[in-house]
Amino acid sequence: MSSSTSDPRFSAAGPPRRPLRLSWGDERLRGIVWQLLVVGLVVSVFWWLWSNTVHNLEVRRIATGFGFLQREAGLPIGESLIPYTPADTYLRALTVGVLNTLKVAVIGIILATILGTLVGIARLSHNWLLSKLAAFYVEVIRDLPLLLQLLFWYTILQGLPGPRQALNPAEGVFLSNRGMKLPFIEWTSVHWLALLAMVVGIVLTWLYARVARAKQYADGQPRKVWPAGVALIIGLPLAVWAALGAPFTPDIPALRGFNFQGGITVSPEFFALLIGLVTYTAGFIAEIVRAGIQSVNQGQWEAAEALGLRRGDILRKIVLPQALRVIVPPMTSQYLNLTKNSSLAVAIGYQDIVSIANTTLNQTGQAIEGIAIIMLVYLTISLSISLFMNWYNARIALVER
């Protein structure tokens, strides 16, 4: 049969589309009508809620809008990543709250991932004691409410001795009921340039590793990446540091009178919140990691052991890369949970976006705007985490052939 007389059922264009009929018996017309009705109903409900809210606010003479953001806050904030005084505006106060939330979320996600991965691997250890301790940690930590754990850690930190009897686990490190004091290097613009050089070095090392791997696939000759990595990640920032003359004078805290002076302070509220979020979320991440590792066929372990590979190399180079395809999707949910659970900080006095926004709406009466700001902040953070994790999950996914 020639190509000119081929069966039209198998052509690329497909069967001809039936025209839309203005009859209720047409399935496509019914679908369009129902969709329009649902959209109209949703829009009507939202319009009714909005108009009713505006009317009630006008009747009660409650101001609306976001003009209050430019007024003086008069709100004291204990810790902030940017300079802040009570004379600043509500907008700057809320910005401090957002940064405090991001600080807890970013540090908590990193630490919870590390701790959860280690505990998940420990659960599969051949060491009976280590495996049972990891299982006990997971079962206990997941069965206790997070709020109760936050209050527990905060009570523990508040029960520490005062500055004069502070615990001194290491040189320049003090732990008291006023928080943890750590040595600190005064940060300047040169330090930012050195940090930028380190980021550039990491990117260049990653690119070099990809090129080296491609060449190894081509000619079978392995190439060492670590010398170039050390030179780029460590040597390049040190060269920038030395060339621009960055100061390196650590500010070591010391007891002066009834309190410490110098160094950097980690407040009890932030410390308790971070410990609670990390330990709680790590319990769930541990189970995800354990399940991901166990999803890899046992034959992978046996084949690698037959080649003489050590168990640690098998886990790092063979099993975990395959387990990531199972681990990453539920891990995204745990990252989102940790970020949203940080809103419990208000219970122990840590001033995040929820705490500052609540104080703002109590002072200004702008309740709707304050709640909307909180919702927008958490929605933006959650969507950003989801987009990044979905991109990473698509990157490591198996490609269908």
Image: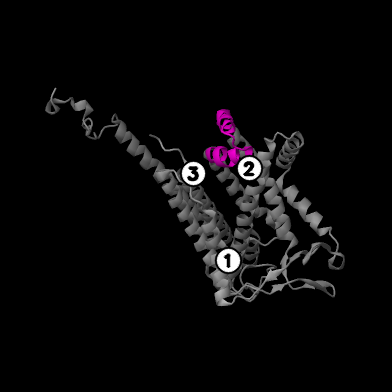
Q: Residue 230 occupies which quadrant of the picture?
A: bottom right
Nearer to the camera, 291 or 298: 298
Q: SS class of the residue under badge 2?
A: helix
Q: Main secondary structure of the magenta part?
A: helix
| 3 or 2: tag closer to the N-terminus | 2
Kindly identify which residue carries mark 1: 95
Looking at the rendered image, the quarter that the N terminus falls into is: top left
Q: SS class of the residue under badge 3?
A: helix
Tag 1: residue type? Thr
Evaluate if marks 1 and 2 touch, with contact meaning CB atoms under 8 Å apart. no
Tag 3: residue type? Asn
Nearer to the camera, 247 or 119: 247
Evaluate if marks 3 and 1 touch, with contact meaning CB atoms under 8 Å apart. no
On residue 285, the disc is: 2
Kindly identify which residue carries mark 3: 393
Q: Residue 373 occupies which quadrant of the picture?
A: bottom right
Report if residue 194 is visible in the image.
yes
Tell me which segment is drawn in magenta.
295-323
Colour scheme in use: one colour
For residue 72: magenta?
Answer: no
Rounded to the nearest angstrom, the CA distance separating label 3 from label 2 is 16 Å
Outermost residue to the top: 1
Say which of marks 1 and 2 sits in front.
2
Q: Is residue 305 above or below residue 158?
A: above
Task: Answer left or right for 356 relative to 260.
Answer: left
Nearer to the camera, 83 or 263: 263
Percent x, y of residue 190: 57, 74
- Mark 1 is surrounded, within 10 Å at the Cα level, by few (under 14), some (14 to 19) or many (20 or more) other residues, namely some
Percent x, y of residue 266: 72, 63
Percent x, y of residue 202: 52, 59
Identified at 70% across, 68% down, the residue is 78
